[in-house]
Amino acid sequence: DQQVKQNSPSLSVQEGRISILNCDYTNSMFDYFLWYKKYPAEGPTFLISISSIKDKNEDGRFTVFLNKSAKHLSLHIVPSQPGDSAVYFCAFFTGNQFYFGTGTSLTVIP
Amino acid sequence: DTGVSQDPRHKITKRGQNVTFRCDPISEHNRLYWYRQTLGQGPEFLTYFQNEAQLEKSRLLSDRFSAERPKGSFSTLEIQRTEQGDSAMYLCASSVGISYNEQFFGPGTRLTVL
């Protein structure tokens, strides 16, 4: 039972443009929503989070949007840079557990 | 380096053998999580510790898997009688506190069962 879905396995974006990564969830009981970035041969690195009581959180070039009615989470990266090329996982926290999506591989083309 | 470390980074074993992985969390972190990640999937929760107590285990953690965290510091994950389906990346993460807080991941141990 996949509680978290990232329907786009890959995304390519030109440098300087906006990257939008999407995530859908089924469980309404999640407390926190997170995005992680993963480079090859490394563990995931925390990027940004948002509480379930908010609908937007911004940190520099990264903004996370939460639409609770649609059970949808998105990450906007503006402007995109080649160093942003990585696999991005959305994750949800509830009940002492983290649930991860399947990941979206972002390629930023110089 | 004060990050989460895992040892070994790679392990190749034959089916039926036992393997043990080690995770050293960030020193002041009282929570420690184990995950398994297969190709094309995100990390899947296996188990977590609050200090030395193992508080939750996933149904993915069959009786061939056992995890320990003696003295609430490093943790070991043992897989007995390995099967080819156990081939995966095993990730460890740690965090501080008693509820949600940022997790820091180690680099993982890649297990290949022949």
Image: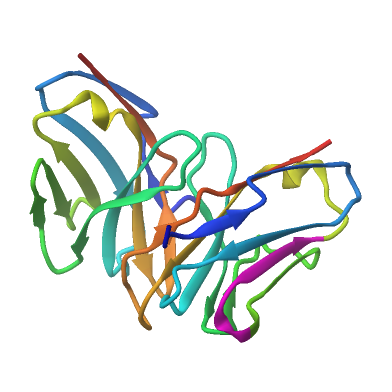
Drawn side of residue A36 relative to residue B9, left or right: left
Dividing the picture into quadrants, the one containing residue B87 is top right
What is the x, y in percent for residue A38?
39, 40
Instruction: Return the residue nearer the eye: A4 or B36.
Output: B36
Against A45, residue A12 (above or below) is above
Instruction: Return the residue nearer the eye: A73 or A44.
Output: A44
Against B105, residue B63 (above or below) is below
What is the x, y in percent for residue A1?
52, 53
Residue at the far front in the pictured view: B1
Residue at image point 44% right, 41% down: A102
Instruction: Return the residue nearer the eye: B57 or B103.
Output: B103
Q: Quadrant of the N terminus of chain B?
A: bottom left
Is A63 covered by the magenta stretch? no
Look at the image and give the residue range highlighted in magenta: B71-79
What is the x, y in percent for residue B101?
31, 71
Drawn side of residue A24 relative to residue B12, left or right: left
Drawn side of residue B42 relative to residue B12, left or right: left
Residue at image point 30% right, 28% down: A85
Residue at the far right in the pictured view: B16
What is the x, y in percent for residue B60?
66, 60
Residue at image point 36% right, 25% down: A10
Is B72 covered by the magenta stretch? yes
